[in-house]
Image: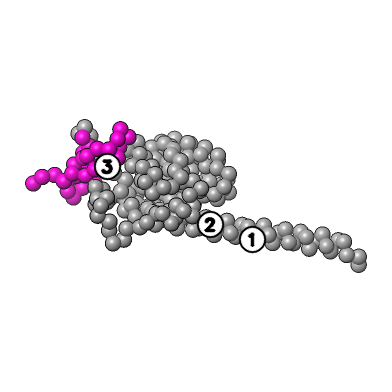
Amino acid sequence: MAVPQAEYELPWGRARGMLFPGTHRMLNTKGISFSPPWQISDVGKPDQPKATELDARRTVARFAQLPIVIAEDDLVSRTLISNLMEKWGFNAVVAQDGHEAMKALRAEQGPALAILDWMMPGMDGLQVCRRIRESEKMVYVILLTSLGTKENIVEGLHAGADDYLIKPFDKNELLARIQVGFRILELHGVLAARVKELEEAATEIGDLKLRIPL
C-alpha cells in the first residue's frame, strides 16, 4: 500500500513528505522523521475545507495591530506555526526560547497575545507565564504542550496561562482560541478605558468640591 504524501512548509521552502498512518510522524524529503505540531489530518488539504473551517479575515481586520508572540524551541514546529500565522495575516513575533519571548513582550507597549511551548530550554513556558503575571502586562497566554493530564492542565493554568492546547492540535482550534484571546484583550481594553474615565471624573468632582465654599 502506498504511503500517503502531504505538502508542508519547512525552513528551506515548500516540500512534500510521507505520512505514517496511525501515527503523528512525518518523513521529509531528506528522510528525517519529525512530528508536526498539529494533527496530520489537517496537513495537505488546502483545497478541501472542513465544515468547521474558520475564516481569520474578520479577526485580522479587527486586531491586525496586536502582536502574537510565538515561543517554540523546535525549529520545524516554530516555522510551521509562524508560517500559519503569516498565512492567516496576523502580526507574528517569533522567539526560539522563553528569554526571547520575554524580551519581545517587554518591547510591546500595549496588549499582546502569546503562544508558548511548555518545554523549552533555559526558561520554559511556565516560567514565562509567571513572569508575565508578575509584570502585570496585559498578555493573553495560550500554552502549547504534549502534556495532557489534568494535573498538567491545572499546573499550566495556575502558572498564569489563560488557555491550554494539547499537541497535536487542530489548526482551526488554535485559530478559535486566538480569536477568543483577542476578544478578551479587547474587553479588557474597554474596561480599562472606562475605569480611567471614572477616575478622571472622580478627580474632577474632588476638585469642584474644593472650589465650592462651605
Residue that appears at 61% across and 57% down: 192
Residue that appears at 44% across and 35% down: 122
Q: Quadrant of the C terminus?
A: bottom right
Name the residue at the left extreme. 1
Where is residue 160 shown, x and y percent of the image?
49, 51
**Mark 1 Cα-neighbour bin, 10 Å: few <14, some 14–19, many ≥20:** few
Dot 3 corresponds to which residue?
Answer: 8
Dot 2 corresponds to which residue?
Answer: 186
The span from disc 1 to disc 3 (Cα, nearest Å) is 46 Å
Where is residue 64 shown, x and y percent of the image?
48, 49
What's under tag 3, amino acid-wise?
Answer: Tyr
Which residue is at the front of the view, 151 or 74?
74
Relative to residue 36, is residue 92 drawn left or right?
A: right
Relative to residue 141, is residue 6 drawn left or right?
A: left
The magenta segment: 1-29
Which residue is at the front of the view, 1 or 87?
87
**Mark 2 Cα-neighbour bin, 10 Å: few <14, some 14–19, many ≥20:** some
Residue 129 visible? The answer is no
Name the disc covering residue 194, or none: 1
**For the residues bearing labels 1 and 2, Cβ distance under 8 angstroms:** no
What's under tag 2, amino acid-wise?
Answer: Glu
Q: Secondary structure at mark 3?
A: strand
